[in-house]
Image: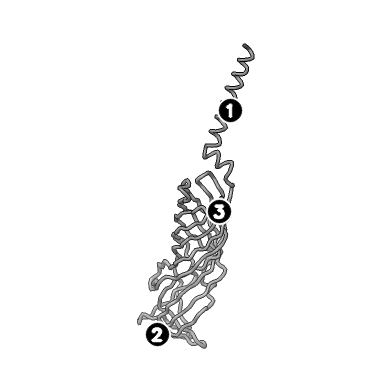
Amino acid sequence: MKLNAKILTLTLFGFLFSNLYSQENNDPEVKFQKEAPSFRLGLHFSPNLSWFGLNTTGYEKDGSRMGFAYGISTEFFLAKNYLFSTGFSINNVGGKMKYEGVYENLGVSVASSVKQSIKVNFIDIPLMLKMRTNEIGYMTYYGKFGFIAGIKYNSKSNYEYVDQNSIKQTDVNNSSNISFFNMNLVVGGGAEYNLSGNTNIMFGISYHNGFIDISKSKTHEINALGKAAIGADGKPVYTDKGVSATLNYFSLDLGIYF
């Protein structure tokens, strides 16, 4: 009798253990903890359309500019559906503006309306939170928000002097007139498609709203004719007021994670 009771007890414990083991392995959260990596690496390429936000009298936006970014993405899993996203990118952005300025040649300054196209190169470091859905078929959808800190390493400008037969100057070094640091608020979304295992391709769109004034240029003093003033020494006259310009852009986000 005692032997039968022991056999029954062992059988019940075996059944309970087997049932708990089965539940543990079918629990998606436990599966995530066991099977999912704590981080993942990826490569990305992002064409963008950028423009200046101008807040200075006499300076107007004159269109947008195409550019691109590329780099490495690193994402750390905070939980099954939440990730901290960082990495670095080489980013090429800019914009166009028009204003009353001067054309300088061989020490002579002449007032002219100016169209300026500026290209700025940054090393970008994103600091973002990404929220993902569970996998639906082979697809996972995500939303993200956060910040991107940019460190400038180069800037060049193209100029067109409208009142001087549209004389043009290209690839003029403009680094001294652009701030060393930039910061963007970023919101975006997209989807990932699972190719195999942990390999996913990613596509999405993001809006980057710059909130730091990146311009270090001074505004021209304007004379009674509405043109940039030229001093008695033949040099342009500047005011103490700076040009206020922020950098905004949309990006098409393409990448692959491993």
> Which marked residue is nearer to the observer: mark 1 or mark 2?
1
- Residue 199, numbered circle: 3
Mark nearer the N terminus (1 vs 3):
1
Q: Which residue is mark 2?
A: 163
Q: In the image shown, does 239 or 42 lie closer to the viewer?
A: 42
**For mark 1, does the 10 Å Cα neighbourhood hold few (<14), some (14 to 19), or many (20 or more) residues?**
few
- Residue 17, numbered circle: 1
Looking at the rendered structure, the number of numbered marks drawn on it comes to: 3
Mark nearer the N terminus (1 vs 2):
1
Q: Quadrant of the C terminus?
A: bottom right
Mark nearer the N terminus (2 vs 3):
2
The image position of residue 169, as x and y in percent, is 49, 82
Tell me whether circle 2 and circle 3 mark residues in contact (CB < 8 Å): no
Query: How far apart in space, not on screen, are marks 1 and 3 (Cα)?
Result: 35 Å
Query: How far apart in space, not on screen, are marks 2 and 3 (Cα)?
Result: 56 Å
Residue type at numbered disc 1: Phe
x 41%, y 68%: residue: 54
Which colour style is shown?
one colour
Q: Is residue 163 left or right of residue 151?
A: left
The image position of residue 126, as x and y in percent, is 53, 57
Residue type at numbered disc 3: Thr
Residue type at numbered disc 2: Asp
The image position of residue 216, as x and y in percent, is 50, 70
